[in-house]
Image (spheres, rainbow, N blue to C red):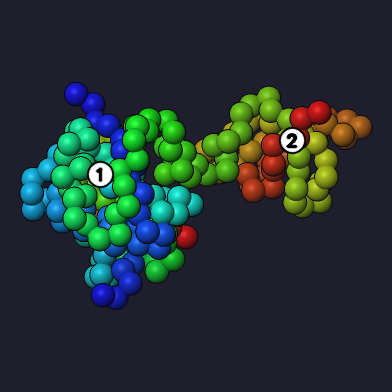
Amino acid sequence: MESQFFVVRTTGGQEENVAEFIYKNAIFNKKEIYSILHVPSQKGYLVIEAKNGQDVREAIAGVKHVKELVPGLLKLGDFDKLLIKKPAIAEFTIGEVVDIVMGPFKGMKAKITKIDLTKMEVTVMLLDAPYPLTLTVDASYLKPSKKG
Amino acid sequence: MPRELACRKCKALTTGKVCPVCNSTDLTSKWSGLIIILDPEKSQVAKILNLKASGRYAVEVS
Ligand SMILES: [Zn+2]
């Protein structure tokens, strides 16, 4: 069976201490806890990946600064983006219109014609130029163009 | 307890000078968030982050 994701509310600022205690509790008492997460932007909360709620309740029992086990479950898709910070280049797709935000062509719009993930470079065709002009730049030179 | 260092390559935390997971010496004190993997076989989080060893990891490393 797949693991489930539970949310535990803690005293703000104590998330990591609480996580360490739950970690030790789970190992010492052989609870089926698979991972414990604290994402910096989620103050006062921990995510606990476990086999079931019973094991979580037992692992957090008596741990200082635990406020409650929040009812309900999270899905991995609810928070996976907080764990995986994709490099800027992975956000772009071929054919996408972008704004150039650095360098001599700053302020122009361009269309992506090629993405080189190994060099972290993007080749674009300038849209505002009077003739077709392509250039290859670092992904940091580009921002997705605001629509509308 | 002294603040641990995070490995820039695999994000593992350590108090030593070498990453215990990947043996890198590229360590930094600038990290945040905490991921504790207890069971890398059963953890979906370990799978999506490609963490093969149990232990403690940072979420963000700079
Ligand atoms: Zn490492």
Query: What is the crowding at mark 2: few (fewer than 14 residues within 10 Å), some, or many (at least 20)?
Result: some
Q: Secondary structure at mark 2?
A: loop
Label 1: element kind: strand
The kind of residue on which mark 1 rests is Ser
Provide the residue designation for mark 2.
A145
Mark toward the start of the polypeptide (2 vs 1) = 1
- Residue A33 seen anywhere in this rendered image of the structure: no
Q: Residue furthest left?
A: A29
Q: Disc 1 marks which residue?
A: A35
Does the image show residue A4?
Answer: yes
Judge by depth and name the residue closer to the eye, B62 or A62. Answer: A62
Q: Nearer the viewer, residue A132 or B45?
A: B45
- Give percent across and percent down for residue A106: 80, 48
The answer to whether residue A20 is above or below residue A9 is below
Q: Quadrant of the N terminus of chain A?
A: top left
Q: Amino acid at mark 2?
A: Ser
Residue A88: where, in percent of width, then height? 57, 43
- x%, y% of residue B22? 25, 54
| Chain where mark 2 sits | A
